[in-house]
Image (cartoon, rainbow, N blue to C red):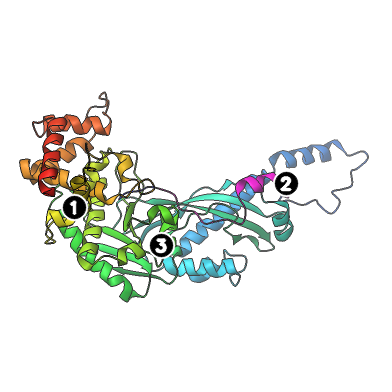
């Protein structure tokens, strides 16, 4: 299953509340000792000098944003350089709750093979409410900052993350005092007891100890091999797994509520670049649902998600969900020693009862908030198996690539996924979608006997 969504840390107040109770943030520069006094008859030279100074003075908001940018640059350099003291120096109080969380975040980041880690240009966020200003001081403010990171040896692109930093000014300069006055995104390194284990092909990060994560490493290593045996388009053959401790933590990682992922054992999550390809996907495991599976089923799930990772890295447009999920299950269930009747039991029960599918599954059939999704996955899997039965595995990959690859000429208009799939039935497989669907439905009825 694939989902692309932001992850956010819950704040003490929403932007709407903060905006409704906003106060004007104090200026950086205070008045001079005699600023309240105005000469009765200033000389022309003095007046000109005063006007020039006022005109040349930097805008206070720009000055504080520049100062924060420098502070965040130092923070990012401390992360990349493994300098904990320099990282702590960017915090207002390293011993506060926020400070301790930030130091735990630093310790987690230090365990990752970071290729890049940087912050972008700070942007103003909704102003603090009156109570918060009274608590922190009149010069406190909040900034929205987008950062980027990548994992060396595993990612071929970077991932963005969004933070809302509350900043205060002290005698020694600006310092970070909190990150809950906005929608700071939850990241993998925020997981408690953060641990990393890795091999040349798989990196697993999550809540430790390492002994808890190593079985996932073995699952990932085998998944990469199984994907490479089917998916012939070149990808980097690398997999990154995120293993939270609880279902709630998993839901936070993918920006969903817990109920919406209750039927899902794992999710592939990541950004697409301007060309439509992924290069920094994460497979996020739902520990509760995953634990209910026997070892063979766990391997199927990880291989299924690894298939999504490989395909998203080598194709540039979406395909119908029956094809993407059916392909991922096809690779996942290969070589696990299960029969089609065993795997598709939920679907075949519906077929025997006369409530089976009448057409290839649609997007709504895979929505766990609307229906029980297992029969739809079974249906998609059997559809892809039927393509292999009739045309061969090589033809299946060619068919998928034809649907999932945008036209090479810029003047061509890419068809919608369903239309592209229908066209590829004709151009690659030499049949029509309607003919294939009729034959597939007949096969389901035969298999259900």
Q: Which one is nearer the viewer's eye here, 27 or 356?
A: 356
| Residue visible at 41% across and 62% down in the picture | 247
Q: Which residues are magenta?
A: 5-26
Quarter assignment of residue 360: top left
Q: Residue beneath label 2, please?
A: 24
Report the magenta stretch's main SS: loop
Q: Residue reaching furthest right?
A: 40
Left or right placement of residue 69 versus residue 250 in this view: right
Q: Nearer the viewer, mark 2 or mark 3?
A: 3
* Residue 318 drawn at (x, y percent): 28, 38
Q: Earlier in the sequence, mark 3 or mark 1?
A: 3
Q: Nearer the viewer, mark 1 or mark 2?
A: 1
Above or below residue 403? Residue 346 is below
Q: Residue beneath label 1, please?
A: 344
Q: Residue beneath label 3, please?
A: 247
Left or right placement of residue 85 versus residue 447 in this view: right
The residues tagged by marks 3 and 1 sit, at their Cα atoms, a distance apart of 26 Å
The verdict on residue 7 being magenta is: yes
| Residue visible at 32% across and 73% down in the picture | 212
Q: Residue reaching furthest top?
A: 411
The residues tagged by marks 1 and 2 sit, at their Cα atoms, a distance apart of 62 Å
Q: Secondary structure at mark 2?
A: loop
Q: Which one is nearer the viewer's eye here, 35 or 51?
A: 35
| Residue visible at 26% across and 38% down in the picture | 320
């Amino acid at each position: 299953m694939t989902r692309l969504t932001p992850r956010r840390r819950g704040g003490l107040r929403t932007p709407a509340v903060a905006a409704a109770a906003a106060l004007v943030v104090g200026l950086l520069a205070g008045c001079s000792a005699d600023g309240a006094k105005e000469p009765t008859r200033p000389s022309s030279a003095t007046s000109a000098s005063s006007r020039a100074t006022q005109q040349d003075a930097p805008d206070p908001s720009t000055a504080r944003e520049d100062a924060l940018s420098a502070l965040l640059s130092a923070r990012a350099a401390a992360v990349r350089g493994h300098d904990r003291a320099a990282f702590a120096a960017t915090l207002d109080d390293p011993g506060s709750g926020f400070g301790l969380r930030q130091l735990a975040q630093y310790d987690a980041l230090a365990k990752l093979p970071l290729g890049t880690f940087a912050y972008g240009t700070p942007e103003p966020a909704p102003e603090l409410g009156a109570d918060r200003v009274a608590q922190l001081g009149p010069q406190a403010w909040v900034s929205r900052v987008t950062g980027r990171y990548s994992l060396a040896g595993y990612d071929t692109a970077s991932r963005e993350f969004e933070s809302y930093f509350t900043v205060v000014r002290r005698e020694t300069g600006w310092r970070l005092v909190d990150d809950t006055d906005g929608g700071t995104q939850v990241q993998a390194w925020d997981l408690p007891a953060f641990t990393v284990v890795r091999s040349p092909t798989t990196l697993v990060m999550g809540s430790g100890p390492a002994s808890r994560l190593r079985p996932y490493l073995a699952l990932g290593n085998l998944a990469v091999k199984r994907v490479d045996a089917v998916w012939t388009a070149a990808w980097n053959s690398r997999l990154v797994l995120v293993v939270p401790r609880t279902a709630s933590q998993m839901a936070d990682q993918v920006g969903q509520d817990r109920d919406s992922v209750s039927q899902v054992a794992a999710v592939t999550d990541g950004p697409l670049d301007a060309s439509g390809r992924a290069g920094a996907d994460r497979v996020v495991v739902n520990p509760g649902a995953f634990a209910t599976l026997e070892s063979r089923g766990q391997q199927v799930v990880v291989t299924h998600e690894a298939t999504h990772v490989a395909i998203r890295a080598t194709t540039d447009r979406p395909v119908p969900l029956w094809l993407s999920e059916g392909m991922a299950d096809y690779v996942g269930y290969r070589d696990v020693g299960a029969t089609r009747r065993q795997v598709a039991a939920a679907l075949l029960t519906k077929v025997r009862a006369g409530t089976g599918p009448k057409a290839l599954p649609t997007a709504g059939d895979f929505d766990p908030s609307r229906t029980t999704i297992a029969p739809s996955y079974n249906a998609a899997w059997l559809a892809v198996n039927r393509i292999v039965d009739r045309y061969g595995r090589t033809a299946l990959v060619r068919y998928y690539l034809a649907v999932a690859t945008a036209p090479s000429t810029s003047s061509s208009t890419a068809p919608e996924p369903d239309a592209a799939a229908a066209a590829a039935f004709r151009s690659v497989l030499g049949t029509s979608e309607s003919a294939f669907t009729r034959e597939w439905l007949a096969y389901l009825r035969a298999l259900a006997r």
